[in-house]
Amino acid sequence: MNKRYKITKEFREAIKNSGLSINELSKKLNFEVKNITSRNDTIREDNLEKLKQYINLPTIKETKINYIKNLGYTFIDRSKKLRENKFLAELIGIVLGDGNLCRNRIHISFDKRAKHYIDYVSKLFYRVTGIKLKYNQIAGTNQSYLYCYNQNLSENFVKCGLQRGDKIVNQARIPLWVMKKKEYMSKTIRGLIDTDGCIYKCKREKQIYVKFTNFNNSLLKDFKTCTNLLGYSFAKSNKHNLCLYRKQEVVRFIKYIQPCKAIGVVV
């Protein structure tokens, strides 16, 4: 089994002060470095060795993960059976965007200032799974996350089409059951836009655009396939971005998909 090492504050600072952006490092190393700077408490030995090629890192100690202890209260499994519906479809999009699925842990990252959205996701997760997520934030930053330890729930998410581990390495994709129904696709797209997307006004052209950014090529392709099937013409703005430019489609997208990021946006 791959050894794991405890991530320290000094370790995170070394990454941030490396002279390379998080996106540049993710591209070079082929895994999501933002997981290390904002989400995970530990790092795998293979990913640590990759980072050492580019950054002068402080020494960190190997740590042992006690999976039995981590299960905590989930010895009594209170999770509900996951059912294929529009609520699960949206949660799938959120996890594909800013979530992380491990052997016995589910973790979703946020900007702590997005209190409305954090509360929204917490309620959605409870509605879908029957599990109340715990909240934590990283001191001195705007980074926060919701999480729970539940091995059975993690396995049920896998059965619904998600994958454990690094989403870029695994080339995580939108589950096939989602892509068979437009209502489900629209909800997954909503979850993806609210996590890895943005809705912004181009000052030069004085127009609202919708953009989706991701380093997972398979997920970008699935996103484009779903949005095409829903009638939206997202186009590549660069290797990792898809953007919706057509004014009438932007208006229709915001009206139909109703992403939380569009609250207060006038189109």
Image (tube, rainbow, N blue to C red):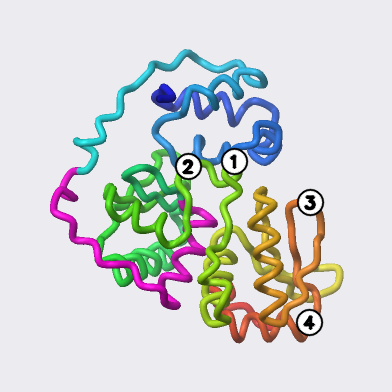
Drawn side of residue 209 relative to residue 170, left or right? right
Residue receiving disc 1: 169
- Label placed on residue 239: 3
User: Can you tell which mark lies on residue 247?
Assistant: 4
Per the model, the C-alpha gap separating discs 1 and 2 is 8 Å
Label 3 Cα neighbours within 10 Å, binned few <14 / some 14-19 / many ≥20? few
The residue that label 2 is drawn on is: 165
Q: Which residues are magenta?
A: 72-99
Measure how far apart labels 4 and 3 are at the Cα level.
23 Å
Indicate the amino acid at tag 4: Lys
Q: CA distance from mark 4 to mark 1?
A: 35 Å
Residue 249 horizontal side relative to residue 117, left or right: right
Where 28 falls versus 132 (above or below)?
Answer: above
Name the N-terminal-most of marks 4 and 3. Answer: 3
Q: Amino acid at mark 1?
A: Val
Mark closer to the observer (4, 1): 1
Question: Is 170 on the left-hand or right-hand side of 125?
Answer: right
**Residue 182 percent location from the top left of the image:** 58, 81
Mark closest to the chain's N terminus, 4 or 2: 2
Q: Earlier in the sequence, mark 3 or mark 1?
A: 1
